[in-house]
Image (cartoon, rainbow, N blue to C red):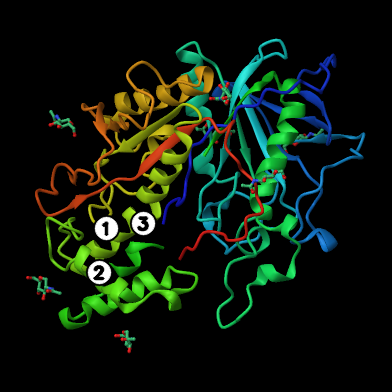
Amino acid sequence: MGPFNFLAIVLLFACLVRASSDSSTNTLSVHLTSGSFAGESLAANGTERWLGIPFAQPPLGSLRFKAPVAITRPSQILRNATQFGNACPQAASAGLGASISEDCLFLNVWRPSGTTTRDKLPALVWFYGGAFMDGAASDPSFDPTRILARSVTIGKPIMFISVNYRVNTFGFLPRLVKHEPQLASSHVPTEDLNAGLLDQRAALTFLQDNIGMFGGDPAKLNEGTSFSQSLLNLNTPSAEEDAAFVTFIKDLMIDPSTITNSTFDTLISLYPANDSSLGGAFNTGDSLYDRGEAWYTDNMYLSARRLLFAKAAPLQPLFAYFFEEFIPGNPTDLGVYHGSELGLLFGPVPNSIEDDFANQLTDFYINFINDLNPGSQWPQYELSTKKVLQLMRNNVTVIPDEDDIPQLCCGPGAVSKIVSRSQMFYAASLENLSVNGSSGNSMPSD
Ligand SMILES: *[C@@H]1O[C@H](CO)[C@@H](O)[C@H](O)[C@H]1NC(C)=O
Ligand SMILES: *[C@@H]1O[C@H](CO)[C@@H](O)[C@H](O)[C@H]1NC(C)=O
Ligand SMILES: *[C@@H]1O[C@H](CO)[C@@H](O)[C@H](O)[C@H]1NC(C)=O
Ligand SMILES: *[C@@H]1O[C@H](CO)[C@@H](O)[C@H](O)[C@H]1NC(C)=O
Ligand SMILES: *[C@@H]1O[C@H](CO)[C@@H](O)[C@H](O)[C@H]1NC(C)=O
Ligand SMILES: *[C@@H]1O[C@H](CO)[C@@H](O)[C@H](O)[C@H]1NC(C)=O
Ligand SMILES: *[C@@H]1O[C@H](CO)[C@@H](O)[C@H](O)[C@H]1NC(C)=O
């Protein structure tokens, strides 16, 4: 499945530029705190890029399962930065764009052709999703050429940086090991827990110190940030459906043993079988799938996003969106699924009917990266009004963040059979939020 747990969030830094300006004759040679690197020009794409730049020491040997350690003794040799660095350890997959190795703490930088250190461009920093289980900055679907071209076209050029961070056991030890009474995390010091999040933070610190060498502005660093599908077409007998629904929920919990049967009974009644008005409201014709999808959306995305917004909206500007566009050609069973808007951002735009809408969506991002505000069409999320922008072709409009979310029909061919909810994403400046990385539990996922 596509990316899961993708957060488009924004970090605002206000520190000083520590790296000094580069006076080298070759403008694509940069001297960074982790070494010197030669980038390459992709004239046809209108970009220049540096791939595979190390931002921390390789987390090997005694550094395995440890918080990332900064590079303090950079090599003086000019290295070729034209190949992606390794992807972090995870299950093999065709879409990684690089080989897998524990030596994986690399980032990649793209900028519009001809950018100079005087330009001080704002930057979008992209952390892949993947439920903290998989993903890689080298994934070809995260090629930013389209976004950069659009930013130049509308006169608001940006840079793009994609970052590797450790995932699964290597980055998030606290996952429960099946059949083990002890959490794996009990074996490592607290300050090393959630090393994957600490990797992200180390990359941001590195960029803070070095982005100026690429023509970026360290004060304008922005961070972009198997579920119910496993239930599809199981043909579970009606008499067993409630039990299968409860099993699905239990399997997503770290420790379901403390949840009472009456709680599960309540969930069964809140997400009833074959009910087109409550819970299973998607009408795919697969009742168990509909219920699982409804529960998953509410519990894994909507409630988490609302909790964050309830806490953070009083602290600083937040902007919420609700992507409701069913892209023609996508599987109707999946409807408007989590991450389906990424094709409109990175391209290639999957269907030319979406071209204008894709530009509109991309412009919101570019505006936000330049101005920390996506534009006048999009009101800030405030607790008194709870306004969310509905993103849908031909109907970009402000809607309330209500208890229940409108159910959507997915366009031509779907008729009334397939109705799906989309996912809520958000963009937030995190300046005033606590982002401590060592809180113990990683997200349950499957
Ligand atoms: C040029 O950009 C396209 C995306 O528009 C990308 O697929 C391609 O890989 C880029 N070329 C190179 C050499 O990176
Ligand atoms: C850098 O790598 C590119 C692509 O592999 C290659 O064409 C180029 O010759 C290399 N440059 C150096 C200095 O090694
Ligand atoms: C849901 O509806 C279908 C079709 O009418 C029916 O076959 C099935 O038994 C129902 N499931 C439950 C759990 O009631
Ligand atoms: C809870 O439900 C499960 C599965 O139906 C059953 O095996 C168990 O005995 C129930 N527990 C209690 C305390 O009722
Ligand atoms: C963070 O909080 C301070 C103090 O309340 C405020 O001045 C600042 O604007 C806030 N930052 C953001 C990005 O909202
Ligand atoms: C646009 O979306 C709003 C909010 O969901 C809805 O009330 C309205 O009917 C839609 N307009 C059209 C033309 O579909
Ligand atoms: C976050 O870390 C800071 C500094 O280590 C500490 O003072 C603060 O209490 C932590 N906040 C939370 C919520 O853990």
Residue drawn at x 92%, y 40% is: 73
Dot 3: what SS? helix
Label of residue 294 in the image: 1
Real-space CA distance between mark 2 and mark 1, rounded to the nearest whole angstrom: 15 Å
Asked if residue 230 is positioned above or below residue 98 in the image, the reply reads: below
Real-space CA distance between mark 3 and mark 2, rounded to the nearest whole angstrom: 14 Å
Which is nearer the N-term, disc 1 or disc 3?
Answer: 1
Dot 1: what SS? helix
Label of residue 266 in the image: 2
Which is nearer the N-term, disc 2 or disc 1?
Answer: 2
Q: Position of residue 193 (x, y in %)?
A: 69, 58
Q: Are marks 1 and 3 in contact (CB under 8 Å)?
A: no
Residue drawn at x 46%, y 50% is: 5
Label 3 sits on residue: 299
Q: Position of residue 263 (x, y in %)?
A: 31, 71
Asked if residue 188 is positioned above or below residue 182 in the image, the reply reads: above
- Figure quarter occupied by ligand 5: top right
Q: Are marks 2 and 1 in contact (CB under 8 Å)?
A: no
Real-space CA distance between mark 1 and mark 3, rounded to the nearest whole angstrom: 9 Å
Question: Is the CB–ligand 4 distance for label 3 below 8 Å?
Answer: no
Q: Position of residue 307 (x, y in %)?
A: 42, 46
Q: Nearer the viewer, residue 322 or 418?
A: 322
